[in-house]
Amino acid sequence: MRRLEDCLNVVDFESAARDVLPGPVFHYIDGGADDEVTKRANTAAFEQYHLIPRYLRDIRAIDMRRTVFGCELQWPLMLAPTGLTRVFHPDGEVGVAEAAAAAGTAYALSTMATSSIEEVGAATQGPKIFQLYLLNDDALNFGLIDRCKAANFDAICVTVDTIVAGNRERDHRTGLTVPPRLNRRNLRHFVQRPAWCLRYLAAGGVGLPNVPAASGGDLGSLAAYFASKMEQNITWSRLERLMAYWGKPFVVKGLQSVEDARNAAACGVAGIIVSNHGGRQLDGGSATIDLVADIVDAVGDRLEVVMDGGVRRGSHVVKALAMGARACMIGRPYLYSLSAFGKAGVARALTLLRKETERTLALIGCASVDEVGRHHLTVNARVPDFLRERRVRTEFTEIGGRT
Ligand code: GLV
């Protein structure tokens, strides 16, 4: 089993989490939809873009601060909303929110969280976003917004890419249930991870305190109740009403097209999060890093564009900023570090990513995140200029021209 100090990057935390979590729980975090093509593409696509460093610049002090969705960030990598966090480790959402605040960044709490809006609001003065799954009853939606107002959240983001559940085949194969329950298919996985089982049982199980259920019940019945309330007809006019009621930065998460981004700008939202839900919903879509620049070009002067999907290195953050994103989000990396080491793991993962981001900025010659731009990017398999000219000449000759 790995020690915390042996984890030198977020991929190390992934294998540490694999060592600690029962298989069905690890695969719930790690898995994507269908063939997981989009999930893999999210990270792999960063490799198509190469950074072009500039030297002989003064990089003694590097300013990574940015204000995004009204949240003052010390560096532009925020923690995306993820559900069921206390299943992975009892430190749960409160531990993650505290680690995010200590690291100078924002935490987004999910509607499907296992800690309440009030608990997270009381735990930290750091920047906080609430992720709202739109329900088919606006009284429930307004009720959640009232709770966010009282708990002093900075922004609300509505996730729009979960109108139906993604097909996560790993969960079907491992026999994952919510809450985790033993059955014939998954028994051996849980037996192999007795420490996790004892920890989970000692914590007394988990609930969904943000689900506005008429009555309580166990996690399974709350989740089923919640699924029955999920809105399948999310409209822009609906969002306009919720946005007006909230009155602070209002953000749409899960857009992937220039056209939807233009609609978001017309609706007047403060920002959008370009995201494919970590490849957990629609499979076969593009990697988000491939989408972000066109969206920034279309709407970047009217709203803030944040990129979520596949970020595993500080250099990925810098590439997204170079494309024009205001900031990035991570999901799985902080869940792996939480699962393996609790809040201390999240703190270390964030420190590593922050240092990587700062080091990358220094190495490309930027003293501030505002200095990063598209001139710092080129594409993989870049053809040297002299060969490019030769290729054009050859093509010209081949179509009958003269050199
Ligand atoms: C929830 O948002 C999930 O992706 O499991």
Image (cartoon, rainbow, N blue to C red):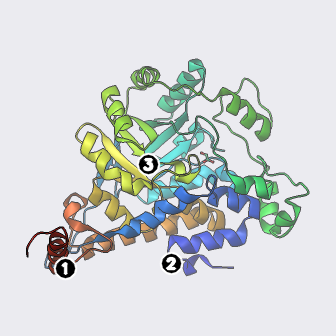
Query: Which amino acid type is marked by label 3?
Result: Gly
Disc 1 crowd rating (10 Å Cα; few below 14, some 14-19, many 20+) is few
Residue 105 seen in the figure: no
Residue tagged by mark 3?
A: 126
Residue 351 at x, y percent in the picture: 44, 68
Residue 222 at x, y percent in the picture: 74, 34
Disc 2 is placed on an element classified as loop
Residue tagged by mark 1?
A: 387
Pointer 1 and pointer 2: residues touching (CB < 8 Å)?
no
Q: Indicate the quadrant where residue 397 lies.
A: bottom left
Residue at x-position 56% and y-position 51%: 283
Query: Which amino acid type is marked by label 2?
Result: Leu
Disc 2 crowd rating (10 Å Cα; few below 14, some 14-19, many 20+) is few
Residue at x-position 57% and y-position 67%: 345
Disc 3 is placed on an element classified as loop
The residues bearing labels 1 and 2 have C-alpha atoms spaced at a distance of: 39 Å
Q: In the image, is 352 to the left or to the right of 27?
A: left
Q: Quadrant of the N terminus?
A: bottom right
Residue at x-position 40% and y-position 65%: 46
Residue at x-position 26% and y-position 41%: 298
Disc 1 is placed on an element classified as helix
Residue 227 seen in the figure: yes
Residue tagged by mark 2?
A: 8
